[in-house]
Image: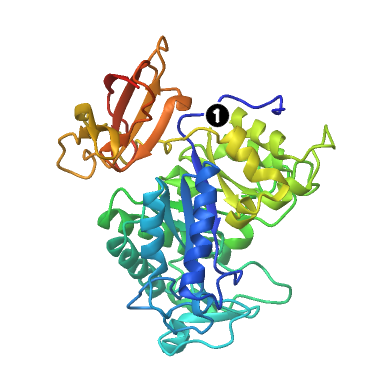
Amino acid sequence: MLPANVSAQQKREFRGAWIQCVNGQFIGMSTDAMKRTLTYQLDELQKDGVNAIIFQVRAECDALYASRYEPWSRFLTGVQGKAPSPYWDPLAWMVEQCHRRGMELHAWINPYRAKTKTTTDLASNHIAVRQPGRVFAYDGQFILNPGIPENREYICKIVNDIVRRYDIDGLHMDDYFYPYPAPGATIPDDAQYRMYSNGIADRADWRRYNVNLFVKQLYDSIKSVKPWVKFGVSPFGIYRNKRSSAIGSNTNGLQNYDDLYADVLLWVNNGWVDYCVPQLYWQIGHQAADYKTLIEWWNQYAGGRPLYIGEDVERTAKYPDVDNPRINQMPAKYDLHSKMHNVRGTVLWYAKAVVDNVGNYGTMLRNVYWKYPALQPQMPFIDKKSPNKVRKLKPVWTADGYILFWTAPKGKDWDDVAHKYVVYRFAPGEKVRTDDPSKIVAITGSTYYKLPYDNGKVKYTYVVTALDRMQNESKARKKKIKL
C-alpha cells in the first residue's frame, strides 16, 4: 500500500547521491574490485531513479584523478602519492559510466582541507610539504589558510584543471570552509589578519570576507572555462539560529555564518552558486535542529537559486514518524518536499545506504517517489533557450529489430546543440502531453531507440524532443507507429 501523502511526481527534479571516499570504503580495493563496486552501485541507483552522482575526488589536497598538481589520494590506494595499479583514472571512468546511464556527474572537492585526522604520511608533492606556510594545523587536521590570497588562486587552478580536462556536469563543494570549532583550539591567522585585513575591524567579518572572495572567484573561474558546468555548495544545515539573527531559524546548533564563516545566503542571493544543498540530516522532531523547521526556513530564504535538500538515509529510516510510529520518516519528509515551493530536488547521504536499501529506502524510491524518470531542474540564469526540434524521425527495420531513428537538430554553440533526447510513448486515445513524466520511456544520448514490437496491431504515438546541456527541451516531433 502506498503512503497516503504521495504527490504526483515532478517532471524536473534533481535526484542526487553522494559517493564519498573519505570514509575509506575504497582503500585497498584493486582496480577491478572498485570498478565492480561502483558499477553495482550505479546500476542500483539508476533503478532507484537517481539522475546525478556527486563523487568525491579531492578530500585533502589530493586526487582521485590524474592530477599534475596534487598527489594520488590514499583513500584510493592506501598510500598518498601512489598511483593505482593497474592504472586507471576514477573520475574519467565515473564520468563515462554516469553519462552512459543518463546521469550527471558532479565532481566533489573539499577546497580548504589539506589533511584529515587519520592521515599520517603526506606525499612529497603535497602542498603542506612543499609550502608548509600555506596551511595551519587545527585539531589534528591541516587547513589551507583562507586568509592567504595565493590559496584562493591555488584552489581555482586545481578546479579549472578538472573542469578543463573532464566532461563533468557540475563542481561541488561541501561544508568545510574554516574548520569546525574544536574545544580549546584557535585558528592561527594573526599574521594574515595583520597583512590582509583591508581595514575590516572584526576578525569574524574578515574571515567571512575571505571565504566570500573565494566563492565568487571560483564561480567566475569555472564559468570562464565552461559556462555550463554547474557550481554547487552543500552547507551545514543551519545558517544562523534565531538567537543570533532576526532571520535565523528556530534552532540551537552550530552555525554556518558564525562558526564556519560561510555566508551561504550571500552566495545564493548574489548568484555565486548555481545550486545549494543544505545538509538537513536531522529527524523531524529533533530538539535542537528540527527537520521541518529547517526545510521551511531554507525554502523561505534560499530560493534565489535551485534548492535541493541533503537527506540522511539511515537517520530517516531509523526514526519513526511522529504521527505513526509504525513507519519511518521517509513519507513525512517527502511530503514536506512536495509542499516547499522552492525545493527542486534531493541529494542522498549516502549512496551506499540507498543501494543497501536501508529501511526499504531504495525500494520506496524505485516504486513510489522516483518511479518515473526526471529531467534536471532548469537554470535559466545560465541558459534558457531551447534547442531546435529533432529531424527525420522514422522507424526502420534492422537486423537488431525495429528501431526509431532521428537526426540531431542543427546547432552551433554549447547552448543550442542537442546533448540528449527524451522519448515519450502514448497509447491509442491518450492525449500527447510531454509534461507527464510517466510517459517517458528513455532519456538518452543516442539518436535512436529500440521499439518494443509485438504483433503490429496497436498504433502508438512516439514523441522525441531534444535537450541541450542545461536540459532545456525542444518542441516535440511525433510519429505514429504500429507495434
Q: Residue placed farthest to the right in the image?
A: 325
Quadrant assignment for the N terminus: top right
475 lies above or below 269? above
- Please tell me in which quadrant of the rendered image residue 453 appears: top left
| Residue where numbered disc 1 is placed | 341
The image shows residue 442 at horizontal and vertical percentages of 39, 35
Give left or right: position of 366 versus 385. right
Q: Secondary structure at mark 1?
A: loop
Residue in view at x 42 percent, y 12 percent? 430
Give left or right: position of 259 versus 433. right
Quadrant assignment for the C terminus: top left
The image shows residue 211 at horizontal and vertical percentages of 48, 62
Which sits in the foreground, 287 or 355?
355
75 lies above or below 177? below
Residue in view at x 22 percent, y 26 percent? 394
The answer to whether residue 289 of the structure is visible from this angle is no
Colour scheme shown = rainbow
Residue in view at x 37 percent, y 37 percent? 443
The image shows residue 419 at horizontal and vertical percentages of 27, 42
The image shows residue 312 at horizontal and vertical percentages of 66, 50
Which sits in the foreground, 305 or 38?
38
Q: How many marks?
A: 1
The answer to whether residue 139 of the structure is visible from this angle is yes
Which sits in the foreground, 183 or 102?
102
- Please tell me in which quadrant of the rendered image residue 166 appears: bottom left
| Badge 1 density bin: few <14, some 14–19, many ≥20, Cα 10 Å | few
